[in-house]
Amino acid sequence: MPVYFESAEQPSTQDLADLEKIYLDAPDWLITPFTNAAELIQQGLTHNTLVTARFNSRLLGAALLDKQAERWLLSHLCVRALTRNRGVARRLVDEATRLATEAGCVLQVNIPAEQPELIQLASAKGLLIAVVN
């Protein structure tokens, strides 16, 4: 079964539970500048920036996708620990890149400056990186 990319506009009760589980597995630095995962999720829903990866009716990954005029910023990408290394994050990035390109925009991935290994990994994958402090 394929992993589907979705905008989380009207999440079900199960979707909200899945989102909590996704970000429960996140390291503390990934949640910043939000105070906790619940605030991150609520802000994403309020501002319509939360995107998800769905497989077999369940959400396995999520991120914030801020669609600005000339560039789209992808941040706070997280995949549930028990489904990591199975292409879920790659699917989210690939689909966000495709949609940004269709909209005439470039996709940048926001990565904190204190995460050099992630910056190096994203660079090796050919992603455009916006380093944030």
Image (tube, rainbow, N blue to C red):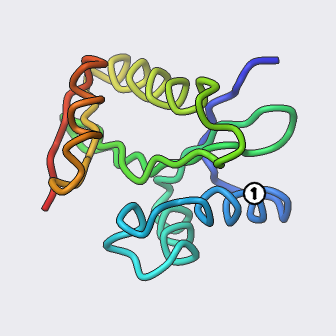
Amino acid type, residue under disc 1 in the picture = Asp
Left or right of residue 64, residue 109 in this image: left
User: Which residue is drawn at the image coordinates 41% and 46% (left, top)?
Assistant: 65
- Specify the quadrant of the image occupied by residue 10: bottom right
Q: Position of residue 70 (x, y in %)?
A: 18, 34
- Specify the quadrant of the image occupied by residue 19: bottom right
Secondary-structure class at tag 1:
helix
Left or right of residue 16, residue 81 in this image: left
Q: Position of residue 36 (x, y in %)?
A: 49, 78
Quarter the C terminus occupies: bottom left
User: Which residue is drawn at the image coordinates 24% and 50% (left, top)?
Assistant: 115
User: Which residue is drawn at the image coordinates 42% and 53% (left, top)?
Assistant: 76
Left or right of residue 55, residue 131 in this image: left
Q: Position of residue 116 (x, y in %)?
A: 19, 44
User: Which residue is drawn at the image coordinates 75% and 57% (left, top)?
Assistant: 18
> Which residue bears the numbered disc 1?
18
- Specify the quadrant of the image occupied by residue 20: bottom right
